Image: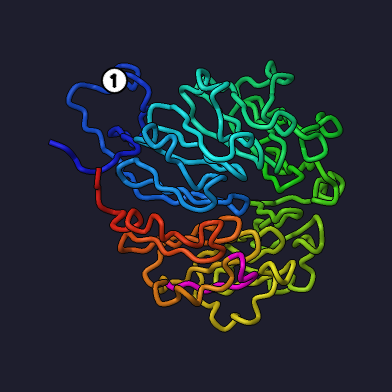
Amino acid sequence: MSLRMGLVALVNQAGTYLDGMSSLRQAGLRDKETITGVARKAQIYSSRMSKAFALIRISGSVVTWGDLDYGGDCSEVAGQLSDVQQIFCSEGAFAALTHDGRVVTWGHRPWGGQSCKVRQQLHYVRQVTGNNFAFAALRGDQTVITWGLDPYGGDSRHVRDQLVSIKAIYATSSAFAARRGDGNVVSWGEPRQGGDTRQVQSQLVSVREIWSNEGAFVAQRTDGKLIAWGEHDFGGDASIVANFFDVRSIQSTGRAFAAIRSDKTVITWGCPEYGGDSNAVQAQLRGVKSVQCTGAACAAVRSDGQVVCWGFKDAGGDCTAVQRQLGNVTSVAGSSGAFAALKSDNTVVTWGDPLSGGDCSSVKHQLQGVVKIVGSYGAFAAMRTDGSVVTWGNELFGGDSSQVEDQLKDLNRFTG
């Protein structure tokens, strides 16, 4: 008998997630022990640098739309896209991680869409990170495999000996940084955009988290101290963040950072025009529970459901035209130049560049019962409670999903 649903994980009676690549003995399961299956939900994947969308159905199959040359067409690898667990983006390609640890890629070949040179090494993969032009895969043995444009992180051979005991990988637009189990950091790719840590290497110890924008990294140590490197104008100036403590999370535009502190206030740095200067709204940045960004603006959601914006006005930094509608907001998603806010009544409010999804008037009547919004470079996709998807924005970048419309319905029902 078939369960007629996809499972993403198994959990034992102690509440521990079981390694899908382990045997029953290795997993420590006892005879007659009860295990719980975690059902797969349909998920949409993209990013504000991505030119297309990819969706995993609950069956584990994949649907794509958007720029056909940059990830919107997966027909060449459709036969390999089964039991997919997660999908990761570069600017022009996607990498799908299957349940058995394989990686399937498609899209613009030079930017990571072609992985044949490393295919034999892409096994037991646990996580994949993409920058604009390359991918880095973290394997079960905590080593790293890279592919894509060599100068921008696709070639990691010169740091291969250091890429051991890796816990997580992070990316700017053209470089990668790997956090090791010992708290040290290894970087590679374009030196000016974070691929060279020599100026701060002695300070990169006991690192517990790393954030990034297009050209800079920020690391947080276990003592709370922040260390920055990369393009100084993008926020990579270590002297600026030297006295920033009590930071809980960081978000970024293309060239600036916004950090939420433990007292729920916000500090910003980097290029002022890209959100690095929040002085004009600083008094309103209280009780902030989350911050999301476009390529050049920030939107903070406060605990009272109000939204505060700053940065480049035409990229979402000015929400005065819709301010009265921005109450009871639960979350915000960003494209490269626009925002989409999800309200507690499951409706949507948008603002910013109309060519980037800032105008949803053509589908406004469909934006009811929305539970999740994802942005691409120039469009948005909204998942509804009825298992359908609504898209709007730049047609080239996924705003028009009519070619796959039939595949974006009844997503909560197992069809294969």
Q: Residues within 10 Å of mark 1 (few under 14, many from 20)?
A: few
Image location (x, y in percent) of residue 88: 52, 41
Which quadrant is home to the C terminus? top left
The structure residue drawn at horizontal position 45% and vertical position 76%, both measured from the top left corner, is: 364
Image location (x, y in percent) of residue 204: 76, 32
Residue for badge 1: 24
Q: Is residue 415 left or right of residue 276?
A: left
In depth, the one of 93 and 35 nearer the eye is 93
Q: Is residue 194 above or below residue 404?
A: above
Q: Which residues are magenta?
A: 347-356
User: Is residue 108 part of the magenta span, yes or no?
Assistant: no
Q: Is residue 118 left or right of residue 362?
A: right
Q: Is residue 158 above or below residue 80?
A: above
Q: Is residue 181 above or below residue 218?
A: above
Q: Is residue 137 left or right of residue 271?
A: left
Q: Is residue 400 above or below residue 112?
A: below
Image location (x, y in percent) of residue 201: 81, 30
In depth, the one of 56 and 63 nearer the eye is 63
The structure residue drawn at horizontal position 60% and vertical position 42%, both measured from the top left corner, is: 90
Which quadrant is home to the N terminus? top left
Residue 115 is drawn in which quadrant?
A: top right
In depth, the one of 125 and 18 nearer the eye is 125
User: Identity of the amino acid at label 1?
Assistant: Leu
